[in-house]
Image (spheres, rainbow, N blue to C red):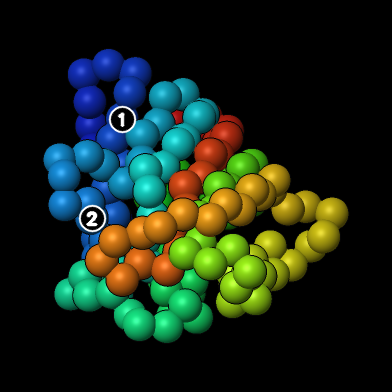
Amino acid sequence: MSIMTAQGRRRSIHIGGFRHGNPIPNACRIGGLVMSGVILGRNPGDGSMPESLEVQCANVFAHMQATVEAAGGSTDDIIKVTVWLQDRAQRGPLNVEWLKMFPDEHSRPARHSMQMDMAGGALVQCDFTAVIDERE
């Protein structure tokens, strides 16, 4: 995991084991604001797409945590998560991982879930916004 250095205020965030096929970073940070690109549930390393929603959800949350940490923060810094599901009625596995990452009902990010047709066997994807105290 690493933060790429940049000439200006904007810094691209890249993590190992999960990268986009297009020439875009996993996330971008300006000051304390971090916004991710789309995070899919691909397996780390080989990039294959698991068949089960449960495994895809676990991978999505692991990639989200790795991304915010590579940006210099933690999951406590995430303030909004948007989730797209192939079948919005199948939120059970999503909620399992949500409660693991955000167990305190008084300290959870906002979340919005929507249904969307996805290609390549994807059953879930998300993006997030985080605000990290500038400690550098």
Residue 18 spot, x, y in % from top left: 26, 61
Residue at image mark 1: 11
Q: Is residue 12 above or below residue 103?
A: above
Q: Does 38 appear above or below 44?
A: above
Q: Pointer 2: what residue?
A: 19
Question: Which residue: 82% across, 60% down?
Answer: 105
- Classed neighbour count for the residue bearing mark 1: other residues with Cα under 10 Å, few (<14), some (14–19), many (≥20): some
Q: How many residues crowd mark 2 within 10 Å: few (<14), some (14–19), many (20+)?
A: some
Which quadrant of the figure contains the C terminus? Answer: top left
Quadrant occupied by the N terminus = bottom left
Vertical placement of 83 versus 13: above or below? Answer: below
30 left or right of 103 in image: left
Front residue of this view, candidates 20 and 3:
20
Q: Relative to residue 112, is residue 54 drawn left or right?
A: left
Disc 1 marks a residue whose amino acid type is Arg
Residue at point 51%, 61% (across, down): 85
